[in-house]
């Protein structure tokens, strides 16, 4: 019994950590995210899914500046921040 509790805690710790990890996009997600990015007059950047949202780092937008953008699971813009 003394061994079971630490093993259970360790197992739950690994399971919780992987659920929040970032991951690459699937092709359908990449297509939809690219369209959402273009709707913001932006393109390029590094795309990933992290913590339940889509993130695009270093996207170049029509104003000539570089931004980091976040989109929700429905590909709606939730954050647009000037990249320093």
Image: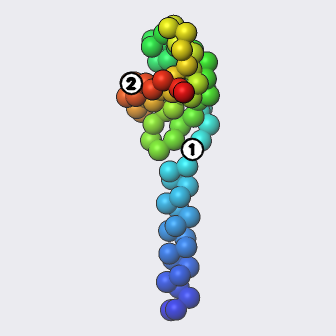
**Residue 4: x, y in percent?**
53, 85
Q: Residue at image x 47%, y 18%?
A: 36
Label 1: how many Cα within 10 Å (few below 14, some 14–19, many 20+): some
User: Would residue 66 be seen by someone viewing this image from the given angle?
Assistant: yes
Secondary structure of the residue carrying numbered label 1:
loop
**Residue 84: x, y in percent?**
54, 27
Nearest the eye: 28 or 44: 44
The answer to whether the residues at label 1 and label 2 have Cβ atoms under 8 Å apart is: no
Q: Which one is earlier in the sequence, the residue at label 1 or at label 2? A: 1
Label 2: how many Cα within 10 Å (few below 14, some 14–19, many 20+): some
Q: Is residue 5 above or below residue 59?
A: below
User: Would residue 75 be seen by someone viewing this image from the given angle?
Assistant: no
Q: Is residue 42 above or below residue 67?
A: above
Res. 78 image quadrant:
top left
Q: Residue at image x 50%, y 8%?
A: 63
Nearest the eye: 78 or 15: 78
72 to the left or right of 25:
left
Task: State the CA–CA distance, disc 1 to disc 2.
Answer: 19 Å
Residue that carries the numbered disc 1 in the rendered image: 22
Residue that carries the numbered disc 2 in the rendered image: 76
Nearest the eye: 41 or 5: 41
């Amino acid at each position: 019994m003394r061994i079971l509790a630490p093993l259970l805690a360790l197992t739950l710790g690994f399971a919780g950590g992987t659920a929040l990890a970032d991951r690459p996009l699937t092709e359908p997600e990449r297509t939809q995210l690219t369209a959402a990015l273009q709707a913001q007059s932006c393109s390029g950047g590094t795309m990933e899914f992290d913590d339940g949202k889509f993130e695009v780092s270093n996207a170049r937008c029509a104003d000539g500046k570089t931004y980091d953008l976040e989109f929700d699971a429905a590909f709606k813009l939730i954050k647009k921040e000037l990249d320093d």
